[in-house]
Amino acid sequence: MIPIVGRWTLEHPGTISLGQGIVHYPPPTSVFRSVAEQAQTDRDLDRYGAVVGDADLLQRFREKLAAENGIDADAESIVCSSGANMGFLNAVLAIADVGDEIILFAPYYFNHQMAIEIAGCRAVVVPTDAEYQPDLEALAGAITAKTRAVVTVSPNNPTGAVYPRETLTAINRLCERRGVYHISDEAYEYFTYGVEHFSPGSLHGSAAHTVSLFSLSKAYGLAGWRIGYSVVPGHLGESVRKIQDTNLICPPKVCQVAAAAAMDVGSSWCREQINGFKDVRDAAIQSLAKLGSRCELSVPEGAFYLFLRLQSEEPDLRLVESLIREFGVAVLPGSAFGSTARCSIRLSYGALEPETVREGIGRLCRGLTELL
C-alpha cells in the first residue's frame, strides 16, 4: 500500500503526506561523525561481519534490554537484523511450516500479515474492542493445533493503542499454557503518553516462548539505516542464524556503526525528541472533532498514529485517492490493516514538523467534510 499511495502523491506535487510511519527529526549528529571516522580508519568496514551482528553492538543492546525492558538476555539470544521487519520474518520462518497459523489482532500491521503469507502460513485475525484492546476470550478460542504464535504490537501500529501490563501478561501466559510463541513487537516503546510500556519478555519463565522485537528506526530517526534487533529463545538461535545468513549474510557493518553511536547517546535523547508529539496529537484530535459523528476515533496512548472510522459507504481506498487528488493530503486506507470497518483511514503525525502536520490535518478535515 505504501508504494501505491506514494505514487499518487508524486503525481500531485505539493501533497502533504500523513501516510508513512517515520519521524520528522534526524538521527543524533554523533551518528554521522562516527560513521565518517570509522569509514576512514576501519578497513574491515567493507568486509562481511558476524551473522547476528558485531559483539560490541550486541553488548549495547544487552545492557539496554536489562536496564530499560527488564529482559535478562544472553548474548547468544540477541540478533541484530536489517530492521525489526526482518526480525519478524526471521521468527516466523524459524517457528512455522507451510500451512501453520499465526494470530494477529485487527487492525494489524500489514507487513506482519504479508510476512506470514510469504512464509506460506495463514494469518488468523482476532478482533479488538472499541479501544483497540485485545479480546482475550476470542484469542483463546482462535488458538488451534496449527497455531504457532500470537503477535502483539504495543504501542500499536496502526491504532496507537498501548496494551496494559495485565493484558500482555495474560497473553504471554496463555501462549505458555497452549504451547505457542508470543512475538512482541516493541518498535514504538518510547512513544507513550502518560502510560507505561511493558515488555512481556521480562516476565519470569517467558524466555523459552517469547520473541521480542525492537527497532532504532523510529526513536533514533534511523529508518533508512535499517537496524533492528530481537531477543529469541535459545533453542531458536541456530535456526535464526541460518535464516539470516541465507537472506542477509550479516547486518550492514556501516549501519551497525551508526546504531552503536545512537545507542551511546541513549534513550533520554529519544524522549527529548518525542516530547512534542503529544501536543501535535491533541491538536489533530481537536481539529478532527469538528467532523462530529462522521468520524470516530479512540485517543491513542502511544506511537504516532490516528486511526479513524468514517461514516461513509465509499471504499476507503477510493476515498484516499480522492483526498490526494482533490485536497492534497495523503493517508492510508484502513482496509490495508485488516480493518473490518467499511471505511477507515490511518494517518501519521510523526513524519512532519508540527506546523506541516497541522496544515495536513486542515486539508484532511476539509476533504472529509466534503467527501463524507
Image (spheres, rainbow, N blue to C red):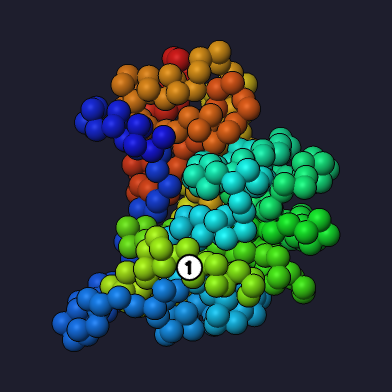
Measured along the vertical axis of the image, is residue 248 above or below residue 323?
Answer: below
Residue 312 falls in image quadrant:
top right
Residue 228 falls in image quadrant:
bottom left
User: Which residue sits at x=45%, y=74%?
Assistant: 52
User: For the image shown, how many numbered marks are present on the structure?
Assistant: 1
Residue type pointed to by label 1: Lys
Measured along the vertical axis of the image, is residue 136 above or below residue 340?
Answer: below
Q: Is residue 354 left or right of residue 237?
A: left
Residue 182 pos. (x, y %): 68, 58
- State whether residue 46 appears in this view: yes
User: Which residue sits at x=64%, y=72%?
Assistant: 235
The residue lying toward the viewer, choosing from 199 and 247, is: 247
Mark 1 surroundings: few (<14), some (14-19) or many (≥20) residues within 10 A: some
Dot 1 falls on a residue whose secondary structure is helix
The residue lying toward the viewer, choosing from 262 and 289, is: 262
The residue lying toward the viewer, choosing from 355 and 2, is: 2
Residue 333 pos. (x, y %): 48, 30
User: Which residue sits at x=55%, y=22%?
Assistant: 343
**Location of mark 1 (residue):** 242
